Image (spheres, rainbow, N blue to C red):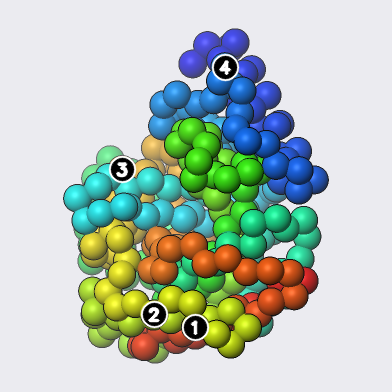
């Protein structure tokens, strides 16, 4: 990447950061500033995430069982426990039901690929999660795809529920989930994680994603994609996600 291109992407990051911090969204990045490759979108993500401090983990998902996963950093400052009241500048207030894993061991960068067994051994616990969707783009799904990806893939918060006992026995391909807003069920689905087998995502992140992450660390979270699509909420509304076997998590917007 040339110095001039890096300067353009830094300018793009400033526009998106300003839009997120003020709540005054932009329709899209100016064409000259839009990332045109996945590497440029990831560079933009990293610049935006760095502005919020330490990385608490990664969001990763795939639109189909055959698709290559995509991932984005999650700022530690945006993470909260079950029952959290989520405030700050909020414009979108989107909600997604997810399953996340807390790492109990480091998975450092290395030349030999990690096996699925090594990844499973490094997981400390499994949790139900609400990913809060937010964006500096007016309608991120109508903006250029690389602009949306660069804007942290619409990440805006992470609320995790209690650890799930014996999570290894859960068949995630048939797991059921419901998401409710203010007590009214909005989405009710079974086996709806779009990656097909969500357990393929952690090995991919630890191996193919390691050049970017620098290796995964104990205490980091990995959340593995939406089961429900984006459900919209309003200020002062409460959200409840309930999995049949993977537990429940609750939050409220200010």
Secondary structure of the residue carrying numbered label 3: loop
Circle 2 or circle 3, nearest the eye: 2
For marks 3 and 1, the one nearer the N-term is 1
For label 1, the crowd category at 10 Å Cα-Cα, with few meaning under 14, some 14 to 19 and many 20 or more, is: few
Q: Is residue 82 left or right of residue 126?
A: right
- Do residues under tags 4 and 2 come within 8 Å of each other at their CB atoms? no
The residues bearing labels 1 and 2 have C-alpha atoms spaced at a distance of: 7 Å
Q: Residue at x 19, y 50 (%)?
A: 66
Circle 4 or circle 2, nearest the eye: 2
Q: Residue at x 52, y 37 (%)?
A: 143
Q: Is residue 64 left or right of residue 55?
A: left
Secondary structure of the residue carrying numbered label 4: helix
Circle 4 or circle 1, nearest the eye: 1
- Do residues under tags 1 and 2 come within 8 Å of each other at their CB atoms? yes
Mark 3 highlights which residue?
208
What percent of the width, then of the height, locates residue 146?
47, 33
For label 4, the crowd category at 10 Å Cα-Cα, with few meaning under 14, some 14 to 19 and many 20 or more, is: few
For label 3, the crowd category at 10 Å Cα-Cα, with few meaning under 14, some 14 to 19 and many 20 or more, is: few
Quarter-of-image position of residue 38: top left
- Do residues under tags 2 and 3 come within 8 Å of each other at their CB atoms? no
Q: Nearer the viewer, residue 154 or 118?
A: 154
Mark 4 highlights which residue?
32
Mark 1 highlights which residue?
185
Quarter-of-image position of residue 50: top right
The residues bearing labels 4 and 2 have C-alpha atoms spaced at a distance of: 41 Å
217 is higher (above) or lower (below) than 122: above
């Amino acid at each position: 990447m040339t110095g001039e291109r890096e300067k353009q992407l830094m300018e793009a990051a400033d526009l998106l950061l300003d839009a997120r911090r003020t709540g005054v969204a932009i329709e899209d990045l100016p064409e000259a500033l839009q990332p045109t490759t996945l590497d440029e979108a990831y560079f933009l993500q990293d610049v935006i995430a760095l502005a919020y401090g330490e990385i608490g983990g990664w969001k990763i998902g795939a639109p189909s069982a055959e698709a290559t996963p995509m991932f984005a950093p999650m700022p530690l400052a945006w993470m909260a426990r079950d029952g959290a009241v989520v405030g700050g500048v909020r414009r979108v207030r989107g909600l997604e039901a997810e399953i996340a894993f807390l790492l109990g061991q480091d998975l450092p960068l290395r030349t030999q690929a990690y096996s699925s067994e090594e990844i499973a051994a490094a997981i400390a616990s499994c949790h139900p999660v609400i990913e809060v969707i937010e964006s500096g783009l007016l309608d991120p799904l109508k903006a250029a795809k690389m602009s949306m990806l660069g804007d942290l893939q619409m990440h805006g918060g992470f609320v995790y529920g209690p650890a799930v006992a014996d999570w290894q026995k859960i068949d995630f391909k048939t797991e059921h989930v419901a998401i409710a807003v203010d007590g009214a069920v909005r989405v009710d689905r079974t086996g709806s994680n779009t990656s097909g087998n969500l357990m393929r995502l952690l090995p991919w992140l630890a191996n193919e994603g390691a050049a970017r992450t620098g290796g995964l660390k104990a205490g980091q979270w990995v959340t593995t994609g939406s089961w429900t699509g984006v459900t919209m909420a309003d200020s002062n509304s409460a959200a409840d996600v309930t999995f049949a076997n993977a537990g429940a998590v609750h939050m409220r917007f200010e």
